[in-house]
Image (spheres, rainbow, N blue to C red):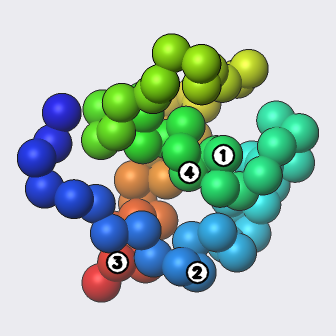
Amino acid sequence: MNNNPMDIPADLYEDEVVCFMADRYHTTTERVVQCFLVQEDEIIAHEKESFPFQLTDNEMEILRGLMSRCGS
């Protein structure tokens, strides 16, 4: 797990790709980003908090790119 806090750009939640993923998984953009962070080992999911979906490798790569682009 990364010790540096990750800065989530606010406009990431409105990005059309993130919105598409949220629609695909029938969830919110916030949950998509949260799932991404858990899969990236940036945050630890609580036991009660599980995701009914897992992002694909391709989706993870797309979100990594969006995070770096939006964060610059």
CB atoms of marks 2 and 3 within 8 Å: no
Alpha carbon separation for disc pair 1 and 3: 19 Å
- Give the image quarter of residue 15: bottom right
Mark closest to the chain's N terminus, 4 or 3: 4
User: Which comes before the other along the chain, label 1 or label 3?
Assistant: 1
Q: Is residue 54 something that shows in the picture? A: no
Q: Which residue is mark 2?
A: 11
Structural crowding at the residue carrying mark 2, measured as other residues with C-alpha within 10 Å and reported as few (<14), some (14–19) or many (≥20): few
Q: What amino acid type is highlighted by mark number 1?
A: Arg
**Residue at numbered disc 4:** 33
Left or right side of 42 for 5 = left
Decide: few, some or many residues near mark 1? Use Cα within 10 Å; few <14, some 14-19, many ≥20: some
On screen, residue 66 above or below 40: below
Q: Which quarter of the image is occupied by the N terminus?
A: top left
Q: Which mark is residue 10?
A: none
Q: Nearer the viewer, mark 4 or mark 3?
A: 4
Tell me what residue is drawn at x 66 percent, y 24 percent: 51
Residue under the point 47% across and 24% down = 46
Question: Residue 31, which numbered label?
Answer: 1
Q: Is residue 48 above or below residue 40?
A: above
Q: CA distance from mark 4 to mark 3?
A: 14 Å
Residues 69 and 45: in front is: 45
Which percent across, then down, holds residue 32? 64, 46
Nearest to the eye among marks 1 and 3: give it: 1
Say left or right for 69 vs 54: left
Assess whether mark 3 and mark 1 are in contact (beta carbons under 8 angstroms): no
> Which residue is under mark 3?
71
